[in-house]
Amino acid sequence: MAQSYQEAEAQYGKESAVALTKQAELMRMKIPEYSNYFDSGNVNLSTQGRLSYRFGHVYHSTYDLYALPSESKLVEDLSHLLDAYEALFYRGGRDSDNIHVEESESIGEIISYEEIYKKRVHLRTERPSSSKIKRIKKKLGFICQACMFNFEETYGNLGREYIEAHHLVPISDLKKGEKRKVTEYDFAVLCSNCHRMIHRQANPGDLEKLKSHIRS
């Protein structure tokens, strides 16, 4: 799993290596569970020429050309890599809106950036209908199951019957073409903060782990 060095070079120039390294680290932070399957260190290849692309590596596996693993092992590694890509896609890709990255900016500097409209075409995962999600929320209640936050108590009528539904088994775990039956037992209702935080865990389905973070 890597990034385009040519794209970064065109955008960042001589700072492209630094930018790619930061973005790769950010992406690993979003899908840390895949560090169990892949390496994230420098790629050591016996080859000549420019190896600038290595800065953009997020995860990779290396094999000995003269002692390749079995076909099933190669297919398994590829499957994990595709799962990692899909999980990263659903967690925002390279966007850093929910990841803290240190920047060396002066306090008085005006922050600015460019917004560009890009049309993207991708596979769509069918989610439960909004009416079913509403029924699940009503059944589970409108109090955060992690921190007990109640939107209505804090915001009055504005927060009445507001809560977010969280998949305890991530949608990104679905393989292409796979189907599964989902019930209210596959969801938790969480406030916005807890919903964000549970997705930062290695296992976003571990509600008890999130509760332990809050208690400690």
Image (cartoon, rainbow, N blue to C red):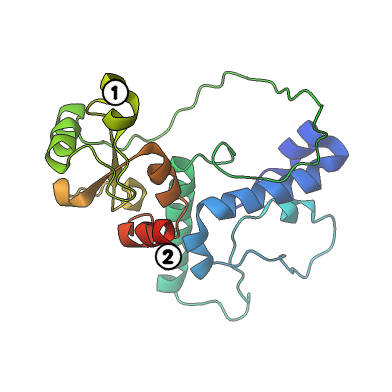
Cα distance, mark 1 to mark 2?
A: 53 Å
User: In this orientation, which residue lies closer to the viewer: 146 or 121?
Assistant: 146
Decide if residue 107 is in sight here. Answer: yes
The residue most toward the bottom is: 67
Q: Secondary structure at mark 1?
A: helix
Query: Is residue 34 rendered to the left or right of residue 99?
Result: left
Question: For the point 32% across and 46% down, which residue is it?
Answer: 171
Decide if residue 203 is in sight here. Answer: no
Say which amino acid is labelled 1: Gly
Residue, disc 2: 75
Q: Quadrant of the C terminus?
A: bottom left
Q: Secondary structure at mark 2?
A: helix
User: In this orientation, which residue lies closer to the viewer: 65 or 136?
Assistant: 136
Question: For the point 65% across and 46% down, which residue is it?
Answer: 3
- For the residue carrying disc 1, how many other residues have a C-alpha within 10 Å: few (<14), some (14-19), or many (20+)? few
Residue, disc 1: 156
Task: Give the quarter of the image for residue 114.
Answer: top right
Pointer 1 with pointer 2, Cβ within 8 A:
no
Q: Earlier in the sequence, mark 1 or mark 2?
A: 2
User: In this orientation, which residue lies closer to the viewer: 197 or 179?
Assistant: 197
Say which amino acid is labelled 2: Val
- 34 is higher (above) or lower (below) than 196: below
- 205 is higher (above) or lower (below) than 100: below
